[in-house]
Image (cartoon, coloured by chain):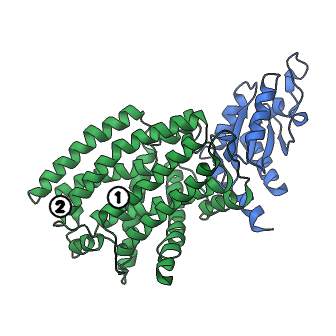
Amino acid sequence: MGEQIFYFFIYPGLLFAGVVGGLLTWFDRKMTAKVQFRKGPPLLQPFYDFLKLLLVKETILPARGSKITFLLAPLFSLIGGTLAAVFILLPLMNINIGFQGDLLVIFYLLTIPSLFYVIGALASGNPLAFVGASREIKLIISYELTFLLIFAAIILKSGMTINLQEIIAIQAGGNAFIGSLSGVLLFIAALFCVQAKLGLVPFDIAEAETELSEGSFIEYSGTAYALIKFTKYIMLFILPALLVGFFLAGFNWVGLGILWSILKLLLVVLLITLIRNTNPRLKIKQAMRFFLVGMNLLVIIAIILAYFGL
Amino acid sequence: MGLKKFCLKKSLWLFHFAGASCNNCDIEILDVLTPRYDVERFGMQLIGSPRHADIILVSGSINQRDKPRLLEVYNQASKPVFVVAFGACGCTGGIFAEGNTFAGPLDQIVPVSAYIPGCPPKPEAILAGITKLVKNI
């Protein structure tokens, strides 16, 4: 029991994922600054932001809304994100406990944070948050199918195993999935899905600052918003880590492998950052068409190619 | 200096409230975000919702229509929040101070923590004002 609590709260769960996610958020902001020829924020900036929201700022409850749902939604999104972090990072960090959690568990747990953002936004009673929530729902509908198809393709490519540890083991020894044609196509689709799951430009439609002024999160302040920020840090770590596990043969924590693992993770985050800095925000209609037509087609082609062993 | 105060100083988020501004101040605010001045070095960023604001930056004179809206935004912001009067109009009312519709200088409506004078203030003046505010928190 004590061991499970350690896995959930400290390593590789809440604390570890949050700290690494915070550092990756700094990396993302620093690279954004570099793209725009700026200097960027200091290393610990994400933690300053988090602590300020958690300790200093006042938490305001909506006058006309469901207060309990409003406060519980960030907590549940954090729990969902942390559980997903545990099940993704245990195989990646090469820790073997009884139940590893298979891909379907990971898929469902990864859906929980965005779902609870929607619930929290709907409980806040703010019309702009309603618009944000409705956009978020449409976005979830459009990318989840693509994401599920990517999972299916990965299962097919790894010879019908749904265990992340085995999928990583199959890729060991130089045959990572990105080395094949179908792997490249799947990686591109998965990168855009991650972009949408993280709510970054071009898919930040739900929290559009300029038109909806933060959309789903408009009413959140203080501790509740700190929890949302923390969930976002965790997601920025585990989703790229999942991509590394799926396509780039996972992490290796022996000798020089450590450096190589960190480079792989930073590379995926850098790709996400570059996409976010070189694209304008899409309309919800365009985003839905992009996923439902374009990306689904790409993934189906990749599945057919994978079936023939390409 | 406690951890709370330190974190607050290191991460001030700006909410921009434009009163009856002529847009010149607003453009100078955008200058501060450009590579040359880059206010994100100090951990500041422009945010969209007053609920997340640590600093409310008020540019332009406040007339009778702006006054209730400014009070609304100020009451909606989660405390502690600091108000910065920006530009000649924000500080004193500028050339509109004698006008019919003028609703009093900003510091008679909400408590003001810092004044940045100028018409419009230079980006250097903005940075100087904001660092002074950070020192006095």
Mark 2 or 1 closer to N-term? 1
Q: Quadrant of residue A45?
A: bottom right
- Locate residue B22 relative to residue B135 in the image: left or right: left
**Local SS, label 1:** helix
Residue at 53% over, 66% down:
A18
Q: Classify mark 1: residues with Cα within 10 Å, few (<14), some (14-19) or many (20+).
A: some
Q: Which chain is green?
A: A
Residue at 35% over, 50% down:
A193
Q: Which chain is blue?
A: B
Residue at 25% over, 73% down:
A166
**Local SS, label 2:** helix
Q: Position of residue A293 (x, y in %)?
A: 26, 38
> Compared to A274, does A104 lie above or below?
below
Q: Which residue is mark 2?
A: A156
Q: Position of residue B48 (x, y in %)?
A: 62, 40
Give, as a three-letter code, the residue at label 2: Leu
- A22 and B51: which one is in front? B51
- Give the numbered dot on residue A107: 1
- The chain identifier of the residue carrying mark 1 reads A
Q: Classify mark 2: residues with Cα within 10 Å, few (<14), some (14-19) or many (20+).
A: some
- A151 and A102: which one is in front? A102
